[in-house]
Amino acid sequence: MTLEPPRLPAPHRTVWQRLRSWFFTGLVVFGPLGLTVYFAWWLISLIDNWVKPLAPSVLWPDNYLPIHVPGFGVVIALFGITVLGFLAANIAGRTLLGAGEAMLDRTPVVRSVYKSLKQIFETIFREGGTQFRKVGLVEYPAKGQWSIVFISSEPPPVIAEALGEEPMISVFLPCTPNPTTGFYFYVPIKDVIEVSITPNEAAQLVMSAGLIQPTRTAALKALAERARAPARVD
């Protein structure tokens, strides 16, 4: 007959410890939800305030209802942008757009701002674009230290000619905790290790300083260890 070891009684939790545990549990549940709702409400209110002076007052339901209806300006903005895109896709719309761009092109300061913003929007929202679809690792800021980068595109011919014959690629290195800021530079293609995680997973990893791990962390770790290993000489 075997004797089981005596079981130790569970540690008694005080009322303060239970309240503290419940508070942090509620904070984890409410924090992301509350901030998301606050940001959505702020964005909707911002768009409503932008659109309201431009739209006729007869269209706003606030003039007929006793309560404020948020989001109506967002609907008007989406409808207006869609109609503008429809008009710009036709011959008459392209003619008017070309005339407007010609007027902006004659304005010294405005033309440079408009062209830069137009190129950015065309690059981000272009259908079938490949910009920032891939994530990689580069050896930065020192040897043996690796940073996550978003792989962009090959350099234009004038820059590629200045960089030499070695194939280069442009990358964007995001900063923590704000991945919209960082460094843009060109590196040799052979020095970039492509990893099989999505840009969203990479952005979460950067924003959380490594606390939110991607679902394919094992593959990322294996690639990093393979990159750190010395090259095999046959």
Image (cartoon, helix red, strand yellow):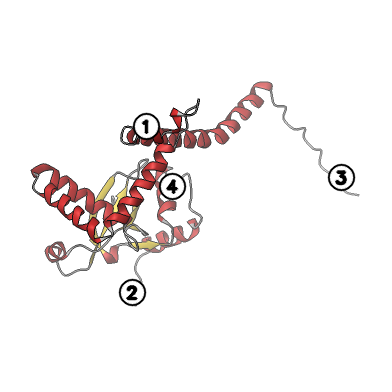
Q: Are marks 4 and 1 in contact (CB under 8 Å)?
A: no
- Between the C-alphas of marks 3 and 2, the distance is 60 Å
Alpha-carbon distance for marks 4 and 1?
42 Å
Disc 2 marks which residue? Answer: 233
x and y percentages locating residue 100 in the rendered image:
17, 50
Please say if 161 is above or below 46.
Answer: below
Question: How far apart in space, not on screen, are marks 4 and 3 (Cα)?
Answer: 51 Å
Tag 3 or tag 4, which sits nearer the N-term? 3
Q: Nearer the viewer, mark 4 or mark 3?
A: 4
Residue pointed to by mark 3: 3
The residue carrying mark 1 is: 57
Q: Residue furthest bottom?
A: 234
Q: Of label 1 and label 3, which has the lower sequence position?
A: 3
Q: Residue 53 in the image: x percent, y percent?
A: 31, 32
Which amino acid type is marked by label 2?
Val
Q: Is residue 144 visible?
A: no
Element type at mark 1: helix
Q: Are marks 1 and 2 in contact (CB under 8 Å)?
A: no
Residue type indicated by callout 1: Ser
Name the mark nearer the viewer: 4 or 1.
1
Give me the C-alpha separation between circle 1 and circle 3: 84 Å
Q: Position of residue 35 (x, y in %)?
A: 47, 34
Nearer to me, 192 or 4: 192
Residue at image mark 4: 204
Question: Along the horizontal axis of the image, is 126 left or right of 213?
Answer: left
